[in-house]
Amino acid sequence: MENITFSKAELERYSRHLIIPEFNIEGQRKLKAARVLVVGSGGLGSPLLLYLAAAGVGTLGIVDFDVVDESNLQRQVLFGREDVGRPKVEAARDRLQSLNPHIQILTYNTPLTSDNALDIIKDFDVVADGTDNFPTRYLVNDACVLLDKPNVYASIFRFEGQASVFNFRNAKGEPGPNYRDLYPTPPPPDLVPSCAEGGVIGVLPGIMGSLQANEVIKVITGVGEPLSGRFFLFDAASFETRILKIRRNPKNPLNGEHPTQTGLIDYQDFCGVGQADESPQGQVKSITVQELQKLRESQADFQLIDVREPYEYEIAHLQGDLMPLGQLDAHLDKISSSKQVVVHCRSGKRSAEAIRHLEQKYGFANLYNLEGGILAWADQIDPSLAKY
Amino acid sequence: MPKIIIPTPLRKFTDNLASFEASATTVGAAIQELTSTYPELKKHVLEEDGALRKFLKVYLGDEDIEGLQNEQTPVAPEATISIIPAIAGGNH
């Protein structure tokens, strides 16, 4: 570590670390020598990357395949208005490099997949998981266990946050629990909150991502007691916190008593994502937004039904009859069984579910799903419509 | 009375109630009491055979009930039971 040296500018920049007795220049050297991969540069990734760059982590890797969207700016404080439309990894690199020119930024403008995860992660010392879906959560966890890397974890939902440090080796070299010790299997897709039930208070990823950054720094420097074997829960609405114990599960397929999994798997399949739509009974008749526009222009006699929630209708609507998915049965008498009925939601998923329900339970045969939902309408027909 | 803390994603089935006071003396019976009061919650918490669903964690205080006596774990009147679902959000 002694071969890690600092310029005068760096010493001045990091001076508030250097004067903490238990941190000092040793801690700063460890940060400079460290390589940290942040997966996802969104809500959690923004504070993570900003604080880790500011703190002087020598090499930061960023994985994200997305571009900056206007709706990101409510919480993704890494980006500004001028970044809208740019790949996130590029916007992030520019911002971080301007914050700290003494560090190296490596960017991966790609989704993390079973094909590339081991290759990308293997050269890093610590991974911080700021992703937003179950398949990638399990992928990051499994890759970290297989490669023996600590995984600093946080996730959020509305006002609720969770954090832990997974797969952390203690002073005796024993690995701590990982995500699969906590949740061996993911929830089935129909029980995962849909986009209608999503949403997050903008400050929460700031709080949880900052906690993650703090844990990353502790893992690297050895200062303090990392959140390993413990599960931190924060309810931002009630301001209640809980810390629960996590123990290793002997049945863990990766590193339990009888491991059965020695490589990465198909995580979309593991989490059941996409299966419902591919099954024959899952298919419903559909029309495109262009076809809907023609129906409207020709003043055809058809009914448009919107199965979203009233608060979504407030953001943007196509003047459809509002019948939220959960209350469809109460609106049966308002659904035409004779003329063509087009059903839409935000992206097309809930409306397909609504059609399957109405076909199977009540025998409707005149229902058409609007492909891509109101988002596709906003993209291809009416750009003035707000997207969310 | 033992208290069950309801996590945000499940509150839509409990009329937005954040915690529930049970009178039962085991974790399993307390959760049965909760799901009988809010039947919509049942399929999200229990399998068809009445076992707890695998993608949820149930804690008594700060201990996972799997390390205690599972559903049979006795609960004291002042105990707090937490139902903790996996949540995945963070990037978008």
Image (tube, coloured by chain):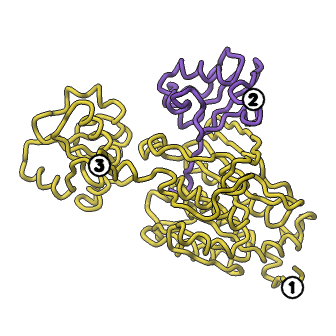
Chain colours: A yellow, B purple
Q: Residues within 10 Å of mark 1 (few under 14, many from 20)?
A: few
Q: Residues within 10 Å of mark 2 (few under 14, many from 20)?
A: few
- Label 3's element? helix
- Which residue: 68% across, 27% down? B71
Residue topped by disc 2: B69
Q: Chain of mark 1?
A: A
Residue lying farthest to the top in this orientation: B23
Q: Chain of mark 3?
A: A
Residue kind at label 3, given as amino acid type: Pro
**Residue A113 horizontal/vertical position (percent):** 52, 67
Q: In the image, are marks 1 and 2 on the same chain?
A: no
Query: Does the residue at mark 3 contact the one at mark 2 (Cβ under 8 Å)?
Result: no
Residue kind at label 2, given as amino acid type: Gln
Is B62 or A213 nearer to us in this picture?
A: B62
Residue topped by disc 3: A280
Query: On residue A3, which mark appears?
Result: 1
Q: CA distance from mark 1 to mark 2?
A: 54 Å
Q: CA distance from mark 3 to mark 2?
A: 43 Å
- Which residue: 65% across, 18% down? B22
Is B64 or A351 nearer to us in this picture?
A: B64
Report how many numbered discs are placed on residues in the image. Answer: 3
Is A226 or A229 nearer to us in this picture?
A: A229
